[in-house]
Amino acid sequence: MDFAEAQKEALGCVKCGLCHSRTQVVFGEGPLNSELFIVGEAPGFNEDKEGRPFQGASGMLFDRLLDSIGLGRGKVYSTTLVKCRPPGSPPRSPRPSEVSHCRAYLMSQISAVDPKVVLALGEMASRILTGKKDPLSRIRGRAIPLDGRYIVPTFSLVKALYVPADRDMLVSDFSRLPELLEAERPSTYDTLNVLATPSADREPIQPGLW
């Protein structure tokens, strides 16, 4: 399924029960030649209302994180594992069957964009995109070579909003993205720990930004 076909099908999709809890489909947005592809878990209330990924308080944090590495929304492709808002307030996590129904859409997006780096936000996105069952605390911040690109698992925006320690690590993980975007595409499946760079060589994070 190519990108245009996937988008057309997703916008009218009724494959699972999430079609009953959505206001509109949140397919994703961004340039199809972006080297950075960011995947969250599912649309929430604000995303469902606006029809765009990463809105509301999470979206504000998202924008500030991108600004901190010299990128804006117009330079990255962003989407979620499932394209419809799960029910509940706050929404529940998507079920494996719901993620499975949307998998073809996500794969079409990744194939069309062909990014160098895929940032997986949260436990579920990290497991789906890396194929690893390790807890996120063990693999976050690592660039995992897969299919000619780096998959970088990290914390979700929602969790980072409420847990300062997780937010600090999310900021740190974002700060390593520029070096991966400048690197050559991986040719092996070895795991590169992007946190291995000596702290003295890292650019300082501006205090008070978060």
Image: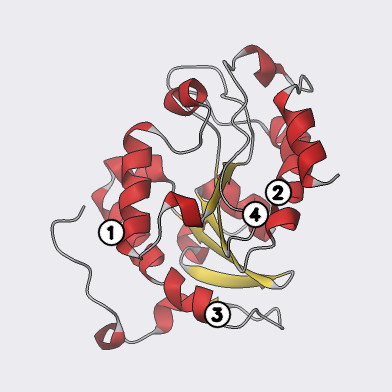
Q: Measured from the top left, where is residue 168 in percent x and y?
A: 28, 59
Pair 3/4: label in front: 4
Secondary-structure class at tag 2? helix
Pair 2/1: label in front: 2
Asked whether the beta carbons under mark 3 and mark 1 sit within 8 Å of each other, the answer is no
Q: Is residue 117 left or right of residue 89?
A: right
Disc 3: which residue: 192
Work out which residue is located at the far right of the displayed protein and give it: 1
Res 32 label: 4
Mark 2 / mark 4, whichever is N-terminal: 4
Q: Nearer the viewer, residue 26 or 20?
A: 26
Res 168 label: 1
Mark 4 / mark 1, whichever is N-terminal: 4
Mark 3 / mark 4, whichever is N-terminal: 4
Q: CA distance from mark 3 to mark 4?
A: 26 Å
Mark 2 / mark 1, whichever is N-terminal: 2
Q: Nearer the viewer, residue 176 or 87?
A: 176
Disc 2: which residue: 109
Tag 1: amino acid: Asp
Secondary-structure class at tag 4? loop
Where 45 falls versus 114 (above or below)?
A: above
Crowd rating for badge 2 (residues with CA inside 10 Å; few <14, some 14–19, many 20+): many
Tag 3: amino acid: Leu
